[in-house]
């Protein structure tokens, strides 16, 4: 089943797990046959003849002014044509939606696999450099420097507080 409607491409947003694309329908487009049947299914949709994206038809919400359609797209799969779709956001477009017959659980598995790949890539970037100092090394070194200073002050015969007081007097 394929449904073609005129829609307002409201927004395209992305978080770490998914990409959300929203459309608003008005007038006769709200009454298009087949929209209800495709809701909660995995669909292939295209805007103004651009290459189709596959996503979950997440929500079909109606109120007195408009009907809102939400699609969840796998961010990894939509990267190729993302810029072309993004340029159309905020404009009236021709939206073509067709069912794929794919199981929603399979699609969710693809999203989870994408998350795992992304997490592995982030962990790879965050590996520790063997030459990098640890926080313990930094604080330990700071304590050593402080104790060295105190020992030097004591060797000069002054208490550390007295020297600090002398330094403060020079400021005024």
Image (cartoon, grey):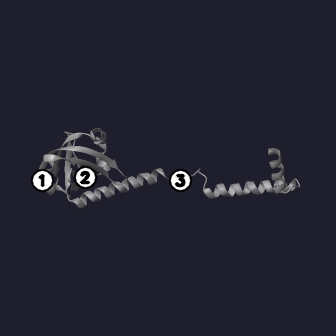
Left or right, residue 8 beside residue 154: left
Q: Secondary structure at mark 1?
A: loop
Q: Earlier in the sequence, mark 2 or mark 3?
A: 2
- Tell which tag, 1 or 3, sits nearer the viewer: 1
The quadrant holding residue 6 is top left
Q: Position of residue 41 (x, y in %)?
A: 19, 57
Badge 3: residue crowd in 10 Å (few <14, some 14–19, many ≥20): few
Q: How many marks?
A: 3
Alpha carbons under labels 1 and 3: distance apart:
53 Å
Vertical comparison of 48 with 134: above or below: above
Residue occupying image coordinates x 59% and y 51% = 132
Residue pushed farthest right? Answer: 157
Q: Position of residue 38 (x, y in %)?
A: 16, 55
Q: Secondary structure at mark 2?
A: strand
Circle 1 residue: 34
Q: Earlier in the sequence, mark 1 or mark 3?
A: 1
Alpha carbons under labels 2 and 3: distance apart:
40 Å
Frontmost residue, 148 versus 69:
69
Left or right, residue 101 beside residue 154: left
Residue occupying image coordinates x 74% and y 54% = 145
Q: Earlier in the sequence, mark 1 or mark 2?
A: 1
Alpha carbons under labels 1 and 2: distance apart:
16 Å
Circle 2 residue: 70
Q: Position of residue 29 (x, y in %)?
A: 14, 47
Circle 3 residue: 128
- Tell which tag, 2 or 3, sits nearer the viewer: 2
């Amino acid at each position: 089943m394929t449904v073609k409607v005129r829609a307002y491409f409201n927004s395209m947003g992305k978080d770490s797990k998914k990409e959300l694309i929203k459309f608003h329908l008005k007038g006769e487009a709200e009454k298009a046959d087949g929209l209800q049947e495709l809701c909660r299914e995995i669909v292939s949709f295209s805007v103004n003849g651009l290459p189709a994206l596959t996503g979950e038809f997440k929500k079909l919400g109606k109120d007195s002014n408009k009907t809102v359609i939400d699609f969840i797209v796998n961010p990894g799969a939509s990267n190729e044509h993302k810029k072309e779709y993004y340029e159309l956001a905020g404009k009236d477009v021709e939206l073509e939606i067709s069912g794929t017959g794919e199981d929603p659980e399979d699609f969710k598995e693809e999203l989870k696999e994408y998350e795992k790949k992304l997490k592995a890539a982030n962990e790879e970037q965050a590996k520790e450099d063997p030459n990098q100092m640890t926080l313990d090394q930094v604080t330990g070194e700071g304590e050593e420097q402080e104790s060295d200073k105190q020992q030097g002050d004591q060797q000069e015969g002054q208490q550390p507080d007295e020297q600090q007081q002398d330094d403060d007097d020079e400021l005024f």
